[in-house]
Image (cartoon, rainbow, N blue to C red):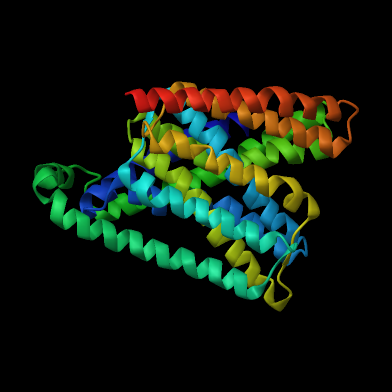
Amino acid sequence: MFPLGIIALVLGAESLVRGASKLALSFGISPLVIGLTVVAFGTSAPETTVAVSAVLTDQTDIAVGNVVGSNIFNVWFILGLSALIIPLSINEQVVRQDLPVMICSSILLLMFVLDQHVSLFESALLFSLLIGYTIFLIVQSRRLSSALQAESTSDIKLSNQEAWDGKLPAQIVLIIVGLALLILGSQWLVSAVTGFARDLGVSELVIGLTIVAAGKSLPEVAASVSAAIKDERDIAVGNVIGSNLFNILGCVGAAGLGSGFEGLAIGQAIVNFDIWVMLAATLVCLPIFFTGREIGRREGGLFLVSYPAYAGFLILAAQQHDQLQAYSTILLYLTIPITIVILIVSFARSLKK
């Protein structure tokens, strides 16, 4: 199952990115919007499944916990890994529009969960915002395309239509097959790694906090890394931002609607810690995105190191480990100040440029 999972992820990412980029070209929609919608929503299918399943089994706090953990993983691990492969230039639309929307959505979710409950009305509002923003993105991109892209992309569109994957049916098949392989491959890989961990004597709790939590985001990892390798940077960045938006507005919204009038009960740990980490992971993008409009390898490395530090804290806290206090002290007085210094240096260099 392990090698099959790897193969399925690679082939699925290849198929999805190819189909998505060709679809964007055929319809005159920017790759960024395709990344924010088709790719992001498709790769977020595992999180949606987990959220709805959690509601149906009366584990409503898992629905929000799943979203929060996935969003932290998306920003720190996926953006970090993609930026290490190739520095990610940030589209002006992301800086001006999509990043602020993601931050506002995160703040909105924070406001909703502070009372440890997400009501039916709040869930409906979240889901409505997702539908509205998706329609806005498509209409906006089509309008810009007709005005700005007609001259520059006419020849490219012609050559695109002559290729075997230039036709709409082929592009839809590529996207569907890619998404199916990504989801199936991630399930195979998580099952295999979970089996390895059990054989090595790793506890179920640690497996759940690490392997299963990260495994749900493997489709996003494969799609963004593949897009970065192919130099489709807008798709790589759009996938992460779109996935985070869909997780907050779509997953929580759908789970809340499925819970009926009872709404979603939120665990105390999420309110006290994890939701704030998610907001911090989102806000830390601001100085990078707004100045140099690029996530370089330095920032990518910083993001990539941040996630294991957070996961380590979760594992120690869940086990009430003796070293939890020492680890927390290191994070507070060493890791966080170093992170702030690196961000200040990146900000200063960007201003200088």
Image quarter of the C terminus: top left
Return the residue nearer the eye: 120 or 170. Answer: 120
- Total number of numbered labels? 0
What residue appears at the point 61 percent right and 61 percent down from the top-left corner? 252
Residue under the point 67% across and 24% down? 335
- Between 5 and 223, the residue placed more toward the observer is 223
Front residue of 79/159: it is 79
Relative to 342, 275 lies left or right: right
The x, y position of residue 164, in whole percent, is 22, 43
Q: Residue furthest bottom?
A: 261
Image point (19%, 42%), residue name: 163
Residue under the point 45% across and 39% down: 223
Q: Is residue 154 above or below residue 246?
A: above
Q: Determine which quarter of the picture holds residue 227.
A: top left
Q: Position of residue 275 (x, y in %)?
A: 67, 49
Q: Is residue 163 left or right of residue 308?
A: left
| Residue 123 versus residue 86 in the image, above or below | below
Q: Position of residue 198 (x, y in %)?
A: 80, 32
Could one spot residue 158 in this view of the protein? Answer: no
- Position above or below: 264 against 206: below
> Residue 292 at x, y = what percent?
36, 31
Residue 205 appears in the figure: yes
Is 326 left or right of 275, judged from the image as shown?
right
Which quadrant of the figure contains the N terminus?
top right
Residue 77 lies in what quarter of the image? top right
